[in-house]
Image (tube, rainbow, N blue to C red):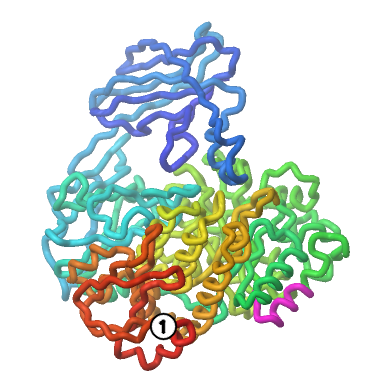
C-alpha cells in the first residue's frame, strides 16, 4: 500500500509525512513529496511527467523518531500532545523536486521499487503571482477617509489552474504606530515586528505565535488612529513590519469561485474602531453577576463526594466560591450522561429526561440533583464540561454507539470531501466524529441531549472546551461551505449552540470557551487554554488577556497558577492569584494526574501544604475577599464596557493612545475605567516599577495620592499587587480596598 495526500491532514503548521510541500508551488519553489508505504515495500520511486516527458526519481526513507518523552510525560494531555503523527505500521518516504517553469504541466505518481504497486496520477499545478485575478475592496467611512493607506502597487493574486486562490497586499504603517489585536496573542501586545497568522489551532501549552482564538482585526495607534478587519473566516497571514518596517503585509485565502476580499478600515480612537468592528461581527454579550465571583476546578474532582468536599473545604477556610467547574462528570463517551447513571439506551439518539435515570447510591454521582441544589443553597453555581465530538473510544457504552450511528445515518457529521464522515485528525480525541454546527437542526439535536441538565437539574453553564478539531480545507459542511471557510467558524457556532440552549431555558448562564474567531465575544466567556506553571507562562497569559480584550473578547480568564505539570511555587501562585483577582474572571484549574500523590490540585491549601507555607492560605483568602467586594464594581463596569466598547480588561492604549511610555510597560492594564493594575510578573522582586499615565491617582493600599505622567517604584510584599485608582473614583472605591489594607 502506498499513500499520498497532497494537502496532508490539515495540521495548521506541520506538514504531514505523506503531504506535498508546498501544496501549490510557485516557479521559485522546490517541492517536497512525501508518501507512506507498507513495510513490505523495500523501495519507492516517483514518476514525474513534465509537459509529457516522464522521469523517475527514487525516494529516501525517512527516519521516524518516536518521542521518548511521551511515555513519561507529566500528564495524559502532555503525553497525547507529544505523541506526534500516528501512521501505524507504515514507513515514511520523501523526495525533493527542483522548481518548475511557470507554464509547466506537471503530474506525478508513486511506484514501488519492484513496480508491483503504484498510485494514480496526481496533478501538480504551478501557481503564479500576478496583478489580476479577483477583487480587493477596501471600505472606509467616507467622512473619515485617510486616503493612501493601501499600497495599490502591492496587490497580487496567486492563480492556480486559472483560478485565484490567494491575495497579497500591503497597508502603510507610519513611524511610531503600534498594532494591537489580531485575537488572543501570547507572544506580544504590540504586534509590530512580528509575522503571524489567523487560524484556530490547539497548541497545548507554550503557544508562542499560535492561538486558539485568532481575530483578523487590529487597532493601529500612535498616529492618527485607525484599525482594520480582514472580513473573512479563511486563513490570513500578517507580516506587521517584519519584512518591510513601514508596511503591514496581508495574505489571505480566497474563494476561487468568488475571488473577492473585503478589508474594512475605521479611523478614530480605539473605542471608535472597536465599535465599528462590533457593527460588523456583533457586540459582546453580558455576564450574569454570579460569574464575577471566584471559580474553582480540577480534573481530579471526578465524584460527587470529591466535588462537595472541595467546596466544603474552601468555604471552611473562608475562601469564597462563586462557581465550581466539574470536568470529569460524564461517562466520557456521550459527554451528556452522568457516569454510573442507569438508564435504557435511546437507540435512535433521541434526548433523555431526568426521569429516565436512576443514580445508584454506590455510583460516582449518587444524587447529582441534590448536589446542584445544595451547592446553589450555598451560593455556588455549577458549570459542566463539554467537548464538540462523539468520541471513538472503545467503550462498552451502548448509548455512545447509538449516538455515533445517529450522527452518521442522519448526515449530521462534518464530512470529508468524498462524503464520508470526517474523523478528527488531531491528537486529542483522535478519530472522533464532529457534529456539523452550521446546521441549526444539528445544533438543536446536540443541545436537546443536554437540555435536561439545565431545565431539570439546574446546571448554570457549560465549559465549552475544544472547538479546534476541524482540520482540512476540503471538509464539507451542511450549509454548502468548505473547511477553508468554516473550520474557523466552528468554535463560535459551538458556543452559540449552548448560549441558545441556556437562553431557551431561561437560564442566566455562561459558556466558557477557549477557541473562537471574530465575534466570539457575543458568546462569553473565554479562557486562555492550557498553560504551564511558570513565570514565562504567567507573562504570556497576561499578554493574552490584554490582546483578547482589544480584539473584542471582554470576559476573559485563565488558569491562574497554571494548569499543567508540577505545582507552581507559593510565590508564583500568589502573584498569579493577585492578577486573577483583578481580571474579568478569577479561577484556578488543574490537569488530571491519575490521582497520584502528591496532589497537583491548584487549591490554595494544597499549594500551602506542599510549599510548607501556611501564609499561602492567608494571602489567598485576602485576595478572594477582595474579589467579593469588587463584584459590584465589576458588574457595573462590565455593562459600561459593552455600552462604550472599551474592554473590561483594557490595554492602556484605549485611554492614552498617543502616550509612548505605555509601551515600556505592556503588561499593565486598566480593570474597568478606574483601576490601573500592574501585575508583578518576575520572580523574587521586592519592589516594582509602575508607570502612571496622565491624571491623578491614588495607591489603593495606602490611600496615598500620586500624580501621573511618571513612573513610581513601590514595595511589593507577597500580599500586594500594585493597583492605583483614579482620584475621581476613589471616594466610591476606598471602602472596597480598606478591609484588605
Residue 371 located within the stretch drawn in magenta: yes
At which x and y percent is residue 658?
A: 17, 71
Residues 546 and 261: in front is 546
Q: Nearer the viewer, residue 726 or 524?
A: 726
Q: Is residue 690 left or right of residue 574?
A: left
The quadrant in which the N terminus is found is: top right
How many circles with numbers are drawn on the protein?
Answer: 1
Residue 656 visible somewhere in the drawing: yes
Which residue reaches farthest top? 114
x and y percent of residue 729 in the render?
34, 89
Q: Position of residue 34 (x, y in %)?
A: 44, 24
Return the x and y of residue 228 as percentages of the image width and height: 26, 63
- Residue depicted at x 60% and y 46%: 75
Main SS, magenta region, reads helix
Q: Which residue is mark 1?
A: 637
Q: Nearer the viewer, residue 521 or 305?
A: 305
Q: Is residue 604 left or right of residue 656?
A: right
The magenta segment is 370-381
Residue 302 picture quarter: bottom right
Amino acid at each position: 500500500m502506498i499513500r499520498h495526500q497532497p494537502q496532508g491532514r490539515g495540521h495548521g503548521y506541520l506538514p504531514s509525512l505523506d503531504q506535498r510541500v508546498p501544496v501549490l508551488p510557485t516557479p521559485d519553489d522546490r517541492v517536497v513529496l512525501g508518501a507512506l508505504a507498507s513495510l513490505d515495500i523495500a523501495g519507492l520511486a516517483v514518476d514525474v511527467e513534465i509537459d509529457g516527458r516522464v522521469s523517475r526519481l527514487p525516494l529516501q526513507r525517512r527516519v521516524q523518531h518516536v518521542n521518548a518523552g511521551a511515555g513519561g510525560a507529566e500528564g495524559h494531555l502532555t503525553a497525547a500532545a507529544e505523541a506526534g503523527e500516528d501512521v501505524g505500521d507504515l514507513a515514511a518516504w520523501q523526495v525533493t523536486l527542483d522548481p518548475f517553469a511557470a507554464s509547466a504541466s506537471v503530474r506525478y505518481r508513486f511506484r514501488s521499487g519492484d513496480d508491483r504497486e503504484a498510485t494514480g496520477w496526481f496533478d501538480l499545478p504551478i501557481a503564479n503571482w500576478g496583478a489580476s485575478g479577483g477583487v480587493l475592496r477596501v471600505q472606509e467611512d467616507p467622512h473619515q477617509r485617510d486616503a493612501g493607506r493601501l499600497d495599490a502597487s502591492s496587490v497580487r493574486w496567486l492563480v492556480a489552474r486559472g483560478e485565484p486562490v490567494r491575495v497579497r497586499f500591503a497597508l502603510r504603517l507610519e513611524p511610531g504606530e503600534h498594532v494591537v489585536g489580531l485575537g488572543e496573542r501570547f507572544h506580544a501586545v504590540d504586534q509590530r515586528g512580528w509575522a503571524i497568522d489567523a487560524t484556530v489551532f490547539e497548541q497545548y501549552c507554550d503557544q508562542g505565535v499560535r492561538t486558539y482564538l485568532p481575530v483578523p482585526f487590529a487597532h493601529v495607534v500612535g498616529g492618527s488612529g485607525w484599525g482594520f478587519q480582514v472580513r473573512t473566516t479563511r486563513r490570513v497571514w500578517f507580516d506587521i513590519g517584519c519584512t518591510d518596517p513601514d508596511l503591514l503585509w496581508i495574505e489571505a485565502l480566497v474563494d476561487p469561485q468568488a475571488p473577492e476580499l473585503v478589508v474594512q478600515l475605521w479611523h478614530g480612537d480605539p473605542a471608535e474602531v472597536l465599535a465599528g468592528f462590533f457593527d460588523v461581527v456583533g457586540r459582546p454579550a453580558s455576564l450574569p453577576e454570579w460569574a464575577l465571583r471566584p471559580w474553582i476546578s480540577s480534573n481530579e474532582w471526578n465524584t460527587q463526594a470529591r466535588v462537595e468536599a472541595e467546596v466544603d473545604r474552601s468555604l471552611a477556610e473562608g475562601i469564597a466560591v462563586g462557581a465550581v467547574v466539574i470536568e470529569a462528570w460524564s461517562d466520557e463517551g456521550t459527554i451528556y450522561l452522568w457516569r454510573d447513571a442507569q438508564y435504557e439506551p435511546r437507540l435512535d439518539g433521541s434526548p433523555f429526561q431526568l426521569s429516565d435515570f436512576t443514580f445508584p447510591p454506590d455510583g460516582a454521582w449518587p444524587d447529582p440533583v441534590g448536589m446542584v441544589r445544595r451547592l446553589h443553597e450555598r451560593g455556588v453555581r455549577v458549570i459542566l464540561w463539554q467537548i464538540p465530538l462523539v468520541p471513538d473510544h472503545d467503550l462498552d457504552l451502548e448509548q455512545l454507539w447509538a449516538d455515533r450511528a445517529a450522527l452518521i445515518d442522519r448526515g449530521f457529521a462534518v464530512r470529508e470531501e468524498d462524503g464520508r464522515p470526517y474523523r478528527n485528525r488531531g491528537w486529542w480525541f483522535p478519530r472522533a466524529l464532529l457534529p456539523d454546527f452550521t446546521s441549526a437542526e444539528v445544533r438543536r439535536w446536540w443541545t436537546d441531549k443536554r437540555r435536561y441538565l439545565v431545565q431539570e437539574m439546574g446546571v448554570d453553564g457549560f465549559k465549552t472546551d475544544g472547538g479546534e478539531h476541524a482540520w482540512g480545507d476540503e471538509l464539507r459542511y451542511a450549509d454548502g461551505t468548505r473547511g477553508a471557510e468554516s473550520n474557523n467558524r466552528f468554535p463560535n457556532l459551538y458556543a452559540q449552540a449552548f448560549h441558545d440552549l441556556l437562553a431557551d431555558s431561561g437560564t442566566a448562564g455562561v459558556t466558557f470557551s477557549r477557541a473562537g474567531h471574530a465575534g466570539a465575544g457575543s458568546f462569553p466567556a473565554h479562557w486562555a487554554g492550557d498553560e504551564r506553571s511558570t513565570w514565562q507562562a504567567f507573562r504570556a497569559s497576561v499578554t493574552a488577556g490584554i490582546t483578547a480584550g482589544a480584539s473584542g473578547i471582554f470576559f476573559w480568564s485563565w488558569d491562574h497558577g497554571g494548569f499543567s505539570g508540577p505545582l507552581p511555587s507559593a510565590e508564583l501562585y500568589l502573584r498569579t492569584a493577585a492578577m486573577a483577582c483583578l481580571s474579568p474572571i478569577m479561577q484556578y484549574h488543574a490537569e488530571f494526574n491519575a490521582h497520584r500523590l502528591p496532589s497537583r490540585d491548584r487549591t490554595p491549601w494544597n499549594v500551602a501544604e506542599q510549599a510548607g507555607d501556611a501564609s499561602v492560605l492567608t494571602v489567598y483568602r485576602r485576595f478572594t475577599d477582595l474579589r467579593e467586594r469588587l463584584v459590584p464594581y465589576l458588574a457595573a463596569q462590565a455593562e459600561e464596557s459593552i455600552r462604550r466598547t472599551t474592554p473590561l480588561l483594557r490595554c492602556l492604549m484605549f485611554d492614552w493612545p498617543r502616550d509612548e511610555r505605555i509601551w515600556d510597560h505592556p503588561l499593565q492594564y486598566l480593570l474597568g475605567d478606574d483601576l490601573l493594575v500592574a501585575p508583578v510578573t518576575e520572580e523574587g522582586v521586592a519592589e516594582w516599577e509602575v508607570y502612571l499615565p496622565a491624571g491623578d491617582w491614588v495607591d489603593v493600599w495606602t490611600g496615598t495620592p500620586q500624580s501621573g505622567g511618571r513612573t513610581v517604584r513601590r514595595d511589593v510584599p507577597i500580599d500586594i499587587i500594585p493597583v492605583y485608582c483614579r482620584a475621581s473614583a476613589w471616594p466610591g472605591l476606598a471602602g472596597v480596598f480598606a478591609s484588605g489594607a
